[in-house]
Structure formats: C-alpha cells, structure tokens
Amino acid sequence: MAKIKTVYFCQNCGAQSAKWIGRCPSCGEWNTYVEEVVQKEELTPANAWKASTSVGGTSKAAKPKPLGEILYEEESRLNTHDGELNRVLGGGLVPGSLVLIGGEPGIGKSTLMLQIAMQLKDLRILYVSGEESEQQIKMRAERMGQQHPGLYILTETSTQNIFKQIDALQPNVVVVDSIQTLHSQLVESGAGSVSQVRECTTELLKYAKETGVPVLLIGHITKDGSIAGPKILEHMVDTVLQFEGDRHLTYRILRTVKNRFGSTSELGIYEMQGSGLRQVSNPSEILLSQRDEQLSGVAIGATLEGNRPLLVEVQALVTPSTYGTPQRSSTGFDAKRLQMLLAVLEKRSGLRLGQHDVFLNIAGGLRLEDPALDAAVCAAVVSSLNDIPIPGDVCFAAEVGLSGEIRAVSRLDQRLSEAEKLGFQEMYISQFNGRGLDLGRFGLKVHPVGRLDEVLSGLFG
C-alpha cells in the first residue's frame, strides 16, 4: 500500500507548502493553511478524462509559431436567447469557454441557469446537479412553464461518472451546479476542498478547450462576498459573473467581474417572478419611484453601467444629530466619497452639516461608483437640509471636485438621450462638457455650470 502523502494548501490563494505555516507568503493571509491528502491513484481510462490523449486520440505536443503566421477567425457565439446575459457575456457564449457564476444562497443562480438551458431549444444541454434531485429540478421547470426535449438532467458528483455520461450524450452545452459539490477520484480529499475544486475545474477546463463545448459553472460565495474556494479558480475560468441583489427585493443584477472575450463593465438586470426571471430591458423606469407629490431629499442622477445609461434616484435624509458624533451612512454609494462631498458642501457652500446626521440611499438596490452622481448627491443633501423639494423633471450628470468646481463626465450624449427619452426637461452638466456636442438636438434644457454654488442657486435660489 502506497504511503499517504499530505500537503498544506492555502484556502485563499491555493498556494501549497510541505508543512503548516501561519502566514501565507503568497497572499499574506493568516491561518489559511489546511492539510489535505493528495496521493493520486494510477491513471486508467476508467477513472480519468482521457488523461493521456487528446480529443483526436493521440498525444500531440504544441510547437511555437511566429505571430504573423497565426490565422485568426472571428468565432460565432452561441445565442442564449437572453438579451441581458448576451450583453454581459459580450455577445453570447463563446465555444469552448468556461463561465463561472457566483452569488449568495437563494439569490436565483440555479433558476437563471435552468432558464437559460431551457431557452436553448435547438441545442442538446446536459444539466449536472450535485445539490438538487431530479424531482426538484422538474418542479422548478414546470413552474417556469417551459419545455425542452433536448435538456438532460444528471444528478451526479463524481467527475469520472459525469465524463462517461458526457461521452455518451455528446451535449452542446454543459451546466454544472455547483463546482463545490464535485469530487474527483484522482484527489483523496473531501468535496469543496481546495485541491478538489482545483482538480475538478482543471478537468472541466480541459474538456471545454479540447471539445469546444461551453461549460457553465455555478459557484458558492463566502461570507465576505468572494467566490468560495482557491483564488486560482477565478484565474482558470474565462469569465466570472456575479449574480447579486437583495433577497427582499425582486430585482437581480448580473455583473461581469472578469471576461476574456468582452467588456468587464457590463450589467444585466432581471426581475424575480413566480415563473422565473424576467429580463428588464429599460431599467431606468424601475429605478425611478413613481411619486404623486414632490418630496425633499430626492434627486435624479444620470449614470452609466458599462455601455448602458441609467437614471437612478438618489435619496438623502439630513436630521439634527442626537448624539455628539454625527452619523454618516450610505447604501449603494461609497461612504468615503459621501464624506468628501459633505466636506465640500460645508467648506465651499457654507452649509453647517457638522451637527447633522446624513443618510444616503441609491434606490433600487444598485451599488454605483460613477462620479457623475456627485451633483445629484449634493443636491439631494441640500434639499433635505432645507426641506425644499427638487422639481421632478430635473436631473444631474456632473462630478464635483474638492474646490467646488463642476467637472466633466464621459459619454454625456448617452446620458442626455436617456433623460430625454424618460421625459426630463432640465439637466445640470459641467460647462466643459458641452464642447463639441450639439446640445440643441436634445429635447431638454441643459444648464452648463462651472461651480457647485451655481447648481444650488439655480435649484434653491
């Protein structure tokens, strides 16, 4: 009997060591090393995915080529029939790509993947589930009200058995739910461990690249919001998507964290319904609350998520501080940037905010970092402080500097077009933003300003 070999792995970055150490030399984290058994068995055709041969049946070593002799052809992407997912992926699924979708428990990852699988009517799909039974998946599919005769369900966690079924079925797309539940017989450790996640991902990556079949992986996340498992997992895959949202709200957001075949700043929005996830084609309408009367502390800002313009509602509440130290709380907006804007208002505009609590919220559950929302944040704070409502047909798209100047923002024409489409009549922008842009072709009144005081005087006198 062979001697059992153990190695210590870092659970954060996947680095290995022959002995336990307190601080990882690769990532600098403390107490992340765990002991795992790594003794591998003999590789045989029964327990490995074509370990020693390529798809053609013979092992072939790669040879270097001059860059000028490499032929490149634009590969046709697979249309997922989901406009939001196509936008986030950069136009569709790339053949042979490995896509990782992460998100909190119960957010709707399995629902999204099953819905995508059932929309690919002209393809043969293998849905591998290590967490749910066949009956549970069938109940979810019936609730969605869709049918797909080419969708096959496999409840299995062993990668060796999964690849046997893949060889027999020859699917066009493979979905795995989830990567943390799989285990390989080549590694003697429990499912979900660092070595198992790395080994199973390596086998799926080799299969995807050799056959050209795209593989979609669902991944768990840790309590701090990062994808569970070694950090090398995100480096191995081609695309990392984050599915997020408040479980108490109906809207879900699909973000691109990494994408080798497209932009990493795209955004997809869904609405969770009883029959599945509905695509939201015009998110500005759901991010703007419908109000019968004008309320103070509310301003509309024009922002961009990837190539998509959005109009979002910025809500502020300013109240006298009950305790000695005033509170500064923000939801969906950078707290440090909020403190900076409050300091600018106090220093440059003469407002007394040092004895007031300030609460800021981006309506709709979005988390935004666009500096073009600065003017809307300042206007909402002053509106709440003076209890004077801002007209409902006014929006803002400008960055505020430390000296109180109004700075230009990118792609102003898209922000103006979105505001015009939703019926806004006025927009405050930087006076340096309108150069080279015909502002007359837009059906709203544009106010080019250079100082924050000009914005506040135009709104509140």
Image: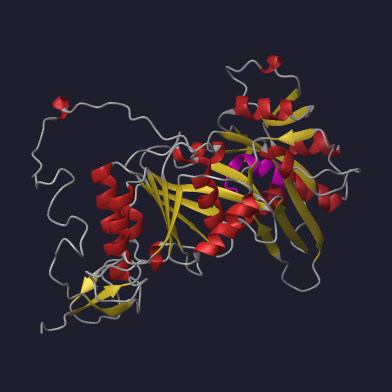
Q: Quadrant of the N terminus?
A: bottom left
Residue 266 seen in this snapshot = no
Magenta span covers which residues?
Answer: 366-377
Residue 318 at what x, y percent from top left? 80, 58
The front one of 385 and 204 is: 204
Residue 283 at what x, y percent from top left? 67, 40
Residue 211 seen in this snapshot = yes
Where 133 sits versus 153, above or below?
below
Q: Quadrant of the C terminus?
A: top right
- Please state if 393 lies on the left or on the right of 277 as rendered: right
Residue 333 at what x, y percent from top left? 63, 53
Instruction: Tell me what residue is drawn at x 73 percent, y 24 percent.
Output: 446
- Please state if 312 lies on the left or on the right of 224 as rendered: right
Where 346 sits versus 133, above or below?
above
Instruction: Tell me what residue is drawn at x 66 percent, y 53 percent.
Output: 343
The front one of 440 and 276 is: 276
